Image (tube, grey):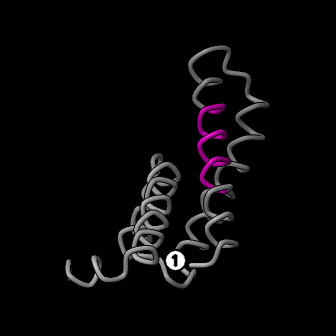
Amino acid sequence: MTDAVRRTLAVLSVLELATLAALLGNLFTVHVPAVSQTLGPAHGAVYLSLAAVALTARGLLPRTRVMAIVPVVGGVLTLVNIRTERRRADDAASHPAECADRS
């Protein structure tokens, strides 16, 4: 997975979480219809973008692809998974002999 894909997934994950938090905050507090009408489609677009990038990007683990399409928590799970994947890739690059022993 390239850094550009990783960065794109991270940005989309944060945006999805932010729009979801704003929608839920609006729902449980003042419930202004204009906010829901604006943020609802924005959240949907970000969610679909995140899913599309995760499903079409090369080098992602199947777990990351599946977690990206889970409603509500997909963005957070994707962010956690791509950080875990990067950590594992960095460990494998810095300690190739140890990683070969594990498999």
* Closest to the observer, 80 or 69: 80
- The image quadrant where one finds the C terminus is bottom left
Q: How many marks?
A: 1
Q: Residue 27, relative to residue 66: is it above or below? A: above
Element under disc 1:
helix
Residue 24 x/y as whole percent: 57, 29
Residue on which the image places disc 1: 55
Residue at left 56%, top 82%? 56
Q: Position of residue 33 (x, y in %)?
A: 73, 28
Tell me residue 99's x, y (percent). 29, 78
Q: Amino acid at mark 1?
A: Leu
In the image, residue 69 sits, relative to residue 40, either above or below, namely below
Q: In this image, 89 relative to 13: left or right?
A: left
Give the answer, above or below, for where 11 lies relative to 59.
Answer: above
**Front residue of this view, candidates 54 and 24:** 54
Apparent side of residue 51 relative to residue 71 in the rendered image (left or right): right
Quadrant where the image shows the N terminus: bottom right
Q: At 45% from the left edge and 47% from the top edge, which residue is drawn?
A: 73
Q: Which residues are magenta?
A: 12-23
Residue closest to the eye, 8 or 2 = 2
SS majority, magenta: helix
